[in-house]
Image (spheres, rainbow, N blue to C red):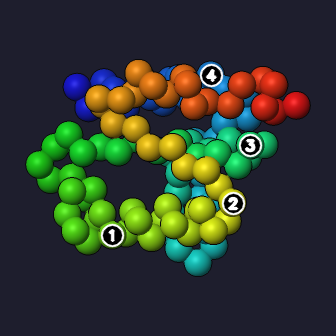
Amino acid sequence: MTSEAKTHFGWICTQVQGMIAEYKFHDARKWRFDFYHPPTKTAFEFEGIGSVKSRHTSIKGYTNDCEKYNEAQKMGIKVFRFTALNIHQLADYLPKERDIF
């Protein structure tokens, strides 16, 4: 389910004009967002926590994610996070045309 959900997540995000995949947002760290929309300073992340070996479920991986998202907040970037279970809510958070212009 997780790989199917991630594929679906990517397809939905690419339907938004101006969305950038694998956007590097920090010069000093190699942090990237799964998708980023520059006009609205909004990032979208798919958290692949469906497998036992996911780095998101270890304390180190989770802490690294916290650092990444906290730094994004300091930079004025809104970050929305999704999993295979709440991906159906993604469309509610995507930028609408009225937000862009």
Q: Is residue 99 above or below residue 54?
A: above
Mark pair 1, 2: CA separation: 20 Å
Q: Secondary structure at mark 4?
A: loop
Q: Position of residue 97 (x, y in %)?
A: 78, 23
Camera-near label (4 vs 1) is 1
Q: Check whether the beta carbons of the residues at disc 4 and disc 3 lie within 8 A of each other.
A: no
Mark pair 4, 1: CA separation: 31 Å
Q: Secondary structure at mark 3?
A: helix
- Residue most extreme to the left: 52
Nearer the N terminus, badge 3 or badge 1? 3
**In which quarter of the view is residue 75 placed?**
bottom right
Q: Position of residue 3 (x, y in %)?
A: 29, 31
Residue tagged by mark 4?
15
Q: Position of residue 23 (x, y in %)?
A: 60, 51
Mark pair 4, 2: CA separation: 24 Å
Residue tagged by mark 1?
63
Residue tagged by mark 2?
76
Give the left or right position of residue 67, taking residue 77 as reference.
left
Give the left or right position of residue 82, taking residue 93 as reference.
left
**In which quarter of the view is residue 15 placed?**
top right
**Residue 22 visible in the current orientation:** no
Q: Identity of the amino acid at label 3?
A: Thr
Q: Position of residue 11 (x, y in %)?
A: 50, 23
Mark pair 3, 1: CA separation: 26 Å
Name the mark on residue 40: 3
Q: Identity of the amino acid at label 1?
A: Thr
